[in-house]
Every structure is written in C-alpha cells, then in structure tokens.
Amino acid sequence: GEDVEQSLFLSVREGDSSVINCTYTDSSSTYLYWYKQEPGAGLQLLTYIFSNMDMKQDQRLTVLLNKKDKHLSLRIADTQTGDSAIYFCAVRSSSYKLIFGSGTRLLVRP
Amino acid sequence: GAVVSQHPSWVICKSGTSVKIECRSLDFQATTMFWYRQFPKQSLMLMATSNEGSKATYEQGVEKDKFLINHASLTLSTLTVTSAHPEDSSFYICSARDPAGGNEQFFGPGTRLTVL
C-alpha cells in the first residue's frame, strides 16, 4: 500500500526558514497536503498542491513537488514561535482516502 | 469555510462501557466521512470510511464490532466504541468530505477518549 515518510523532528531558530520533507510511494496520488497540528487539537489544513504542479506559494509557505522523486517539501519562511507544532504530509488516493506521514515535530527556538 | 465539529471533545469512561462520538458537518453535506485514530506522538491511522445510507468500510485490522459506525444523515456520523478497554484510549478524529468543495476533507477538532 501507499507509504508516506517524514523526518521526525526539526529545530530552527526564530526568523530562520524551516524546510520539512516528505516522500511517498504512490505515483498516482493526485493531491498532496500539508497539515498542522497543535497539542491536543485537530488538524489544520495549511496548503495543498495538485500533482501536475511543481511549486505553490502561499504567503510564508512554499510547497515544492518533485514528482519524479516522489518528494514533497514545505518551506516556512521567517519561522515564528507560533509555528511550533507537528506538521503532517498527506497524500490522497483515488478513493479519496488520505494517507498520512508520521509527522514532523517543529520546534522554533527564540 | 467548511466546519466539522465533534462531540464530546473529551470523555473519560470505565472499562466495559460504550462511548459514542459524534461528527457533524455544520455548513455542508458530507456523503462521506472518515474516522481516524491517533496515538500519542504518532500519526493518524484511518479506521473506516463512513458513507451516508450504507455500511461503513473498515480498514484492515479494525474490528467492526468493536467500533460501530453509523452515518444516518448527510451531516452526522457517529462512532461507538463498544465495551471500551484501556487500550482503546486514544485521540479520535473525524473528517468530512465536501463533494461541492473539490472533495476536500475537513477535519474535526478530535475527541480524546480515556478508558480507566
């Protein structure tokens, strides 16, 4: 079945850029998502990219998709302490199911 | 934007009791809802897909008699954890698919279940 992998932890200094990486196995995935989860809360959709796109920018967020390598990344510019959370990569299958990565815990140091 | 609510937000129950969790799409009709389970510091695992008016489809390894799902209307799906045990303690999250909104899934805030 589909497998989605993420690194578990990232620590950056406030004001720096953060880059969170994700790899997936199903080349037929049509939509790829980034979600943010704060402690004890549900998931907040940050952004998504359609599989025929290479890049999408939304304010401080930039998503890059390398379809050949099945690699997705999320860049957060000017990272703030409020960005500290767990970030999940997810890919959507043809049956609308979402397959999630393990999540990357982002810690922003003052 | 599309809003999904869950009730209750947290529940503590005794071992052996059953607990019902509700998932509602507040401003759209959801023909499909999904139930996920999340253990501490882990990812979301899809438990089942709930379709309005038909039986839910369970993922491999999920006991359908243990986790009863009812999707009685286009805005409500319920998950009942029957005869709960401490190992059922987890964070349960639902999502609802909006067919009129590009088939995007919108997530509820989650329900934390603690079984004593």
Image (cartoon, grey):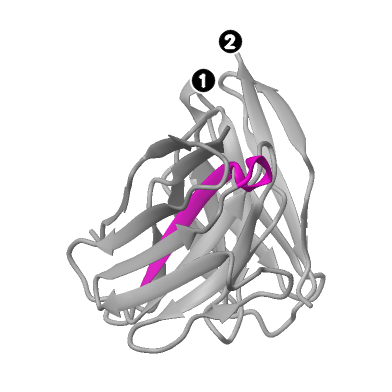
Q: Which residues are magenta?
A: B85-97
The kind of residue on which mark 1 rests is Thr
Note whether residue A74 is visible. Answer: yes
Residue that carries the numbered disc 1 in the rendered image? A81
Residue that carries the numbered disc 2 in the rendered image? A110
Front in this rendered view, residue B103 or A64: B103
At 38% from the left and 74% from the top, the residue drawn is: B70
Please state if B106 lies on the left or on the right of A54 as rendered: left
Q: Are there few (<14), some (14-19), or many (20+) residues within 10 Å of tag 2?
A: few
Secondary structure found at label 1: helix
Front in this rendered view, residue A23 or B52: B52
Note whether residue A54 is visible. Answer: no
Residue B7 is situated, as x and y percent measured from the top left of the image, at 31, 48
- State yes or no: discs 1 and 2 in contact (Cβ < 8 Å): yes
Q: Quadrant of residue A77?
A: top right
Name above or below for residue B62 compared with residue A30. above
For the residues labelled 1 and 2, the Cα–Cα distance comes to 7 Å
Name above or below for residue B71 compared with residue B94. below
Residue B83 is situated, as x and y percent measured from the top left of the image, at 55, 54
